[in-house]
Structures are given as C-alpha cells and as structure tokens.
Image (cartoon, coloured by chain):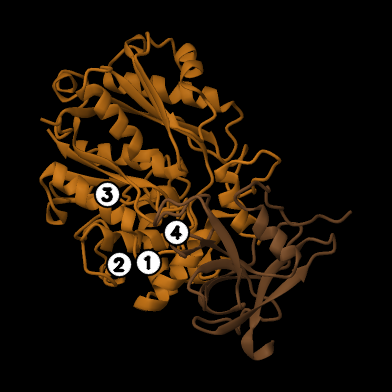
Amino acid sequence: MDATRIKPPLGPDNRWWWDMADHDKLGIQRCTDCKTLRHPPRPMCGECRSLEWDAVEASGNGTICSYTVLTHPRFPGYDYPLIIVLVDLEEGTRLTSQLVDCTPEEVDFELPVVMTIQQDADGFKLPVFQLAERA
Amino acid sequence: MPVSLKNEAAIAGIGMTEFSKASGVSELSLAAQCIVAACDDAGLQTSEIDGLVSYTLDSSDEIEVARAVGAGDLSFFSKINYGGGAAVGTIAQAAMAVATGQASTVVCYRAMNGRSGKRMGQGVSGDIITSDLVHWSWYMTYGMLIPGSWIAIIANKYMHRYGVTREDLGRVAISQRNYALSNPRAWGYGKALTMEQYLASEPIAFPLCLYDFCQETDGGVAILVTSAERARDLRCKPAVIRGVTQAATQGQEQMTSFYRDELESLPEMEMAARRVYAQAGLGPADIDAACLYDAFTSEVIMQLESFGFCERGEGKDLVRAGELDIGGRLPNNTHGGLISEAYVHGMNNIAEGVRLVRGESTGQPDKNVEHVLVSSGVGVPTGALILGKD
C-alpha cells in the first residue's frame, strides 16, 4: 500500500471533528453555556469553564489569514508543492488547512476560500479549501 | 518578602563537546563530556554537583548523567518542556535552586545527536492519546511536519504587514555567518555566505529558504550555576544572573499560536522582556550585546521589537543599518548562533552570552560589554536571561 498522510490520534477531545469531516462537514466546537466558538477543540470552555459543548457546521466560507508553500523535504503521503493556509472562517474561528486546485503563484493574503472535502486513496477524508472564484 | 533572583546566582562554568554532524557516540556520552568540561571550566569537581536541569526533549535523564560523571548526591533535578523554549528556563530553575538553598552547584545541560540521531520534524503519531499528540495532529495531518512550516505562517504574515524582504532575512543570516567565520567551533567557520548565495538557496517553507534555517547538530553544552558569592572565588570571571524568567501567554500553543487576534508579534517574548528588565532593573538601552534565539532568521527581527530595541515593524531597519554586526548598536549571536555555529537548542547561545560577559568571544565587540541578553525559543513558551559583569 502506498504511504499515507499521518493520521490524527482520536480521543474524546477531537474524534467528533474528524467524524464530521468523514460526513463531509467542517465542524466548529461551541460552548453550550456561553455559546463561544472555539478551535482547536478543547474539553473545557476557557471563557466560562463549562464542560458542556456541541458542534456547529461551518458554512465553509473564509479568507486566507496567512499561508506557506512547502517544497522540501517531501514526506510520503502528501502532495507538493503543498500550500498550507491559515483560514479565518466567517463564523470567527481560524484553522489550518490545505489549499487545493491552486498554484503557489496564485495564493495570497485575504483571498476568499471555500471548504471542500478531500478523500485520500485510503478513504480518509479531511476538510481542505479552494479559492472561492474556482469553487 | 519574595526572593528576587537578581544577583543571587552566577554562571561559573561553560562546557561543550565538539559540534558535528555525526558524533559517533551516544547522547549520554555527549552529556557527560560537556558537563565535565563545564566543571573543569569552573575549577570544580563533578562530585560537587548537587543539581541537574535539562530539557524534556533530552534523552539523558539526570540520574544517568549523575552516574556517568560521578556527581554527588542530588537535591535538585528537573526538566523543562517546549524544545528550545526550555533554554534559559534551565538557568531560571538553577538560579532559583541556588537562591533558595535547594542546591549549591547546579549544571544545566542539553546534549543531542540532532543530525545523526533523531532529527526535528519527522512527525509524531501513535495510538497513545495525549493532549500534546492531539495538538500536533491538527498540523501534521495536513503535512506541517517541520518547525519551518509552523514558523513560516507567522513569518509570512509579519513580513507582509511590515514590508520585511527576503534580503532582510538574508542580512541576518549573513551577519551571523560573518561572526562564525572566526569561530573554530562553528559550522560556518571559514565559510563565507554572500547575498547572492542566500537568495539562490533552496526554498523550503515559503518565505523561508535553506539559509533561514538553523543547523542540525550533534553536540552537547553544559552551564554551571552557583551562588554569585562562590563564583567570585572560582577559576573564571562570573557571569552574574541579573534577571531570568520563563514566559507563556494567553493563546499560547507550542509553535502554532495561530489563533490570537494579532500574529505579527511575540506576546510571550514581550512578557519575558517586561519581566527580565524589571527584575534586573535594566532596560533595552542597558543591553550591550545579545544572543537572540535564532532557529530561523525571521525570529531575530521580530525579537528586536519584542525586547524594545525598536518600535513595531522597525526590526528590519536595525538589520539594514547593520546594528547587529560587530560594530553595531547590538552585536547579536557573535558566535554565529544556531544558524551558523550549531543547533544545541539554545544552550550554545547561553554559553556565548557568558563568553561576551567574560570578554572571550571570537566575535567580541570592541566596546565594554556590561550586560548581555539571551532568549529562549521563539513561538513556544519561552524565557529571557540577562547576564552581567561582576
């Protein structure tokens, strides 16, 4: 079998996020007491100390806050040049992801992007982003 | 009344192994060798060691090291987390131990086969669930496996906002290489680096290229801390600890503090600056030279702002004016730093801080060096240290 990307260890604090991705959704954790959204997920709300939370489905719309283009070294399981984006979601949280269907010359700050689900050859699904003008 | 660490402890000895790309010996061997060298430098016997401090990333546990070097009974031992963020934190722990009587002779060490053994950025994964592994998984699943990939996200944003250019990063790399030219311990010893070479170097994580990255090194460095009073009677001129602190701020992650409102500054380094200046009763104008943590060139420029040597966005102007060079306002990493001497997780930068205070650097500025600032890793929970002449 070909090499695959490094998979996240799945525990009570993060398994749900990857389960949502497996169902083609981008999740954002929400405190059910004070309604604060948070990412990356954590077991307790840092604002109100509540242990109660649920998840909302993000619209998938966002803008590029920052980015990098990885060219070396090339690890098995990833496509290079690998464009990594830090995305400001319209809901107000931020996450790191990959920009697909785009060349390194085209990526820039503040560009609108839209989430899409990528499925690897081994069936693993993860939320990635496309330039909005291309979606 | 709380105990102030100001002037309580001093660095009385520094020791290191050869820096190489393939040591051919175990990390424990490197640790033992550099500790013996630090004791020799101070003129003390290893049997007088009663405290040991290292990094959680160090593979040589304190008791293994103690047996190897024939240390005395240990009354203080600890390890500090967060990679290079531990660097001056080890000195903070040692100084606290000395100031409070927990130990009298504490050696801080970091020894690693950083090139021939476990290299940085090979990825972590596994069936064991820890908060640390979950943290890394948000990045590694997407292919961000190397430290450069994490730092590049911040560097790119910072450079974009303040108009910092690739040439500015190149000026940092070349400034430090120029210091390394005359340092026989350094990877860059005798190897000049031109701007042409710098700009042509291999892209790794845009905007960072090969020469923006530190070395990967096999080597060990040990720092011996004892009371300032006792240090005066030992072999070398003491480097007195004027102030030292650790620092982690809200929104802090390990290398990936991407979720703060502002990404173009280093809040933890600003906290370290406030605390270390207050403790020492000093300010940026009192600092004569520095060893600013330099795993990447961009970090050096950002720290000039964190430590108040200029305003926000002006770090590049100091670099362009040559202020980090040997005749400049703030000679920085006069041994070549992690970029051009060796990457021993910042411990070699502390050793250089001691040499500058003693007046023994191969890149010693032609001026009185009263106070030297040394910082720990950037982008991680960190810290700062001010060393002074006795």
Q: Which residue lies at the image location 43% right of the left edge and 62% below the top edge?
A: A34
Instruction: State the separation of the CA atoms marked 3 and 4.
Output: 16 Å
- Distance (Cα) linking label 4 and label 2: 25 Å
Q: Earlier in the sequence, mark 1 or mark 4?
A: 1
User: Are both tags, 3 and 2, on one chain?
Assistant: yes
Could you say which chain is coloured orange in the image? B
Mark toward the viewer: 1 or 4: 4
Residue placed furthest toward the bottom: A133
The Cα–Cα distance between marks 3 and 2, rounded to whole angstroms, is 22 Å
In this figure, which residue is indicated by the disc labeled 3? Answer: B272
Total count of labels: 4
Q: Which residue is mark 4?
A: B257
**Mark 3 belongs to chain:** B
* Mark closest to the chain's N terminus, 1 or 2: 1
Of residue B219 and residue A104, the one placed in the foreground of this image is: A104
Q: Amino acid at mark 4?
A: Ser
Q: Quadrant of the C terminus of chain B?
A: top left
What amino acid type is highlighted by mark number 3? Ala
**Could you tell which of marks 4 and 2 lies nearer the N-terminus?**
4
The reply to whether dot 1 and dot 2 touch (C-beta < 8 Å) is yes
The amino acid type found where label 1 is placed reads Arg
For the residues beneath circles 3 and 4, the answer to whether they share a chain is yes
The residue pinned by badge 2 equals B319
* Left or right: B101 as drawn, with respect to B171: left
Q: Can residue A73 be seen in this snapshot?
A: no
* For marks 3 and 4 on the same chain, the one whose residue lies earlier in the sequence: 4
Residue shown at the point (49%, 83%) measured from the top left: A110
